[in-house]
Image (tube, rainbow, N blue to C red):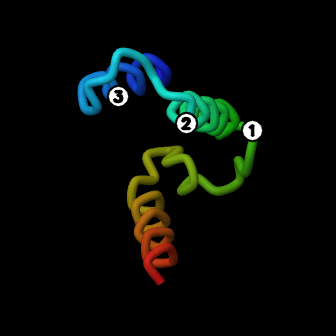
Amino acid sequence: MTEEVFTKLAMEYFHIPKLTKAMRAALKEWTNANASVDSHDQFFSANHFDGENFKGGQDRLVNLAEVMVA
């Protein structure tokens, strides 16, 4: 599903006939990360928005964004 959406959006927004080498590498990294999400850190619901923990997940994302900006 990730590959399909990524490819569709790349074609739509960049008007290219096929993914570039860099895009394919990014896609591979992205799909691997998505696939491994549930194999890491199952102790904190905010990391996965588990149990409807939207507040915890949102707080975590806001904090990560602030760290990146800093």
Q: Is residue 66 above or below residue 58?
A: below
Q: Quadrant of residue 13?
A: top left
Q: Is residue 59 above or below residue 26?
A: below
Callout 1–callout 3 Cβ contact below 8 Å: no
Q: Look at label 1 and name its amino acid.
A: Ser
Q: CA separation, marks 2 and 1?
A: 26 Å
Residue that label 2 marks: 22
- Residue drawn where x is 49% and y is 48% of the image: 49
> Residue 18 placed where, x, y %?
42, 17
Q: For the residues carrying marks 1 and 3, which lies nearer the camera in this image?
A: 3
- Residue drawn where x is 49% and y is 66% of the image: 60
**Residue found farthest to the bottom:** 70
Indicate left or right for 29 with 48 as reference: right
- Residue drawn where x is 31% and y is 27% of the image: 9
Q: For the residues carrying marks 3 and 2, which lies nearer the camera in this image?
A: 2
Q: Is residue 17 above or below residue 70?
A: above
Q: CA separation, marks 1 and 3?
A: 28 Å
Pick the residue in front: 3 or 43.
Answer: 3
Q: Look at label 3 and name its amino acid.
A: Ala
Residue that label 3 marks: 10
**Label 1 packing within 10 angstroms: few (<14), some (14-19), many (20+):** few
Q: Quadrant of residue 22?
A: top right
Q: Look at label 2 and name its amino acid.
A: Ala
- Identify the secondary structure beneath mark 1: helix
> Residue 41 placed where, x, y %?
72, 51
Q: For the residues carrying marks 2 and 1, which lies nearer the camera in this image?
A: 2
Pick the residue in front: 31 or 41.
Answer: 31
Callout 2–callout 1 Cβ contact below 8 Å: no
Residue that label 1 marks: 39
Q: CA separation, marks 3 and 2?
A: 12 Å
> Residue 11 placed where, x, y %?
31, 22
